Image (cartoon, coloured by chain):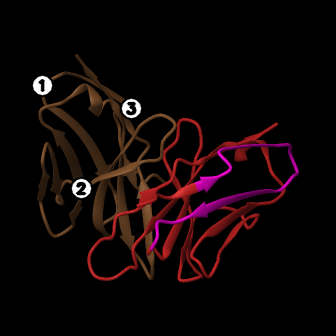
Chain colours: A red, B brown
Amino acid sequence: EAGVTQSPTHLIKTRGQQATLRCSPISGHTSVYWYQQALGLGLQFLLWYDEGEERNRGNFPPRFSGRQFPNYSSELNVNALELEDSALYLCASSSPTGQGYQPQHFGDGTRLSIL
Amino acid sequence: DQQVKQNSPSLSVQEGRISILNCDYTNSMFDYFLWYKKYPAEGPTFLISISSIKDKNEDGRFTVFLNKSAKHLSLHIVPSQPGDSAVYFCAARAVLRTYKYIFGTGTRLKVLA
C-alpha cells in the first residue's frame, strides 16, 4: 500500500511569492490534514479537509489556504510568503471519520525555505 | 497557549532499560491521546493511542498510561532498543464541533547501545 506522498520535497521561494504544496493521501482515505513544523516547535495544525470540504482550521492567517480535490488529494497554498513561513509542512491522511479513532498517517513533508 | 506539553526536550536511556516519555495537557475536551515517532527526514509514524475513558493501552513493547486527574499521559517503552532513538510527539484530539489535533513539541529519545 502506497503511503502519503507529498511534493515537492524541497521548495525555495523569496518573500512575497506564493507557494503550492501537494499531497496525495493513502488510497481509501478521505481526510487530509496539513501541519506546519517550524524549527524547534511541535506540529502546528493548519487545515483539515474531509470529503472535499474544509472541516477545521488552525490559528493561521488567511494567506494559508488549501483545497481538496474529488480524488481526495489536496493542495496547500501560501500567499505573500514571509520569512517565518520557513518550515516543514506535513500532510497526513486518515480513514473516513466514524466511531472510534482513525490514526493519521503522515507523509515525509515539504521543506519550504523562504530567502 | 500550549495545551499539550512535553517538558523534557531530550532523554537518554541505556539499551534494554525502560524509556518513559511524559506529556501533560490542560484541556479536558480531549477524547483521544496519541503518540507518534519521528525519524529525521521522515514524517511522524503513529505508535499507539488511548481513549480518554481508558487508563492504559498496551501494544507490544509500548504502553501508554493516562492519568486524567493529573492530566498526564506517559509512554513506556520496554525494553528500549537503539532503533527506538527518534523524536516522540504526544498529541491529543480535541472534541469541538469538529476534531482538532494538538501536538506537543516532542522529546528526543536516544537509546544508548
Q: Residues within 10 Å of mark 2 (few under 14, many from 20)?
A: some
Separation (CA) of disc 1 from disc 3: 21 Å
User: Residue at coordinates 46% horizontally, 57% vertically from top-left?
Assistant: A3
Residue A104 coordinates in the image, percent (x, y): 40, 62
Q: Residues within 10 Å of mark 1 (few under 14, many from 20)?
A: some
User: Residue at coordinates 87% horizontally, 52% vertically from top-left?
Assistant: A17
Numbered circle sitting on residue B9: 3
Numbered circle sitting on residue B72: none
Asked whether B98 or A95 is in front, the reply is A95
In contact (CB < 8 Å): disc 1 and disc 2:
no
Asked if residue A59 shows in the view, the reply is no
A50 relative to B101, above or below: below
Separation (CA) of disc 1 from disc 2: 29 Å
Query: With A3 as the anchor, is B90 left or right in this view?
Result: left
A13 relative to B8, above or below: below
Name the secondary structure under disc 3. Answer: loop
In the image, which is nearer the foreground, mark 1 or mark 3? 1
Q: Do marks 1 and 2 both belong to one polypeptide chain?
A: yes
Residue matched to label 1: B16
User: Residue at coordinates 12% horizontally, 32% vertically from top-left?
Assistant: B79
Asked whether B53 or B87 is in front, the reply is B87
Residue B16 coordinates in the image, percent (x, y): 12, 25
User: Residue at coordinates 45% horizontally, 79% vertically from top-left?
Assistant: B98
Range of magenta residues: A6-27
